[in-house]
Image (tube, rainbow, N blue to C red):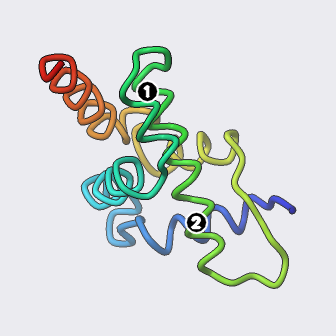
Amino acid sequence: MKTKKEITFGTLNSYFLNTATMTINEEYLNHLLNIHCFNSDRQLYEDMKNKRTKSRSLAWRGLIGLTNELIENDEYPVKYYATNDQLKKWLNEYGRGYETIAETVNDIETYRQEELFAE
């Protein structure tokens, strides 16, 4: 598998960039990220049930997984993947850095609190 910044940025921009303002549509990004974290990645969902991993790290893992799925859906002839550095640069260039995915981090925290009270 290969990585290429242009492919990562191109894929993310095609899904999440508001071209009128040249900023990330945070609501849509967090919506899809929530779906991915809570429904698409079984291991990630299981890891949310314990406190060993910070919510911020889980949301980040979800963003990497979501991005790689979207890149794969673009059907490049060679398998490409996104790197942490590419995602950080994209969030900083078009969004508010880590704050861009703060809604998902909060949703994971809320879920964990609800799970704690359910025990």
Residue lying at 80% horizontally and 71% vertically, measured from the top left? 79
The residue singled out by tag 2 in the image is 69
**What type is the residue that disc 1 sits on?**
Arg
Question: Residue 97 or 111: which is nearer the viewer?
Answer: 111
Question: Residue 38 or 75: which is nearer the viewer?
Answer: 38
Residue lying at 70% horizontally and 40% vertically, measured from the top left? 85
How far apart marks 2 and 1 lie (CA) works out to 20 Å
- SS class of the residue under badge 1? helix
Specify few, some or many for label 1: CA neighbours under 10 Å numbering under 14, 14-19, or 20 or more: some
Instruction: Point out residue 107 in the picture as x, y percentages from the top left corner.
Output: 24, 36
- SS class of the residue under badge 2? helix
Q: Earlier in the sequence, mark 2 or mark 1?
A: 1
Compared with 33, 76 (above or below) is below
Instruction: Point out residue 34 in the picture as x, y percentages from the top left corner.
Output: 32, 50
**What type is the residue that disc 2 sits on?**
Glu
- Whether residue 60 sits left or right of residue 76 in the image: it is left
Instruction: Point out residue 32 in the picture as x, y percentages from the top left corner.
Output: 35, 60
Q: Which quarter of the picture shows residue 1?
A: bottom right
- Whether residue 24 sits left or right of residue 1 in the image: it is left
Q: Which quarter of the picture shows residue 89?
A: top right
The residue singled out by tag 1 in the image is 56
Residue lying at 42% horizontally and 65% vertically, measured from the top left? 17
Instruction: Point out residue 3 in the picture as x, y percentages from the top left corner.
Output: 81, 59
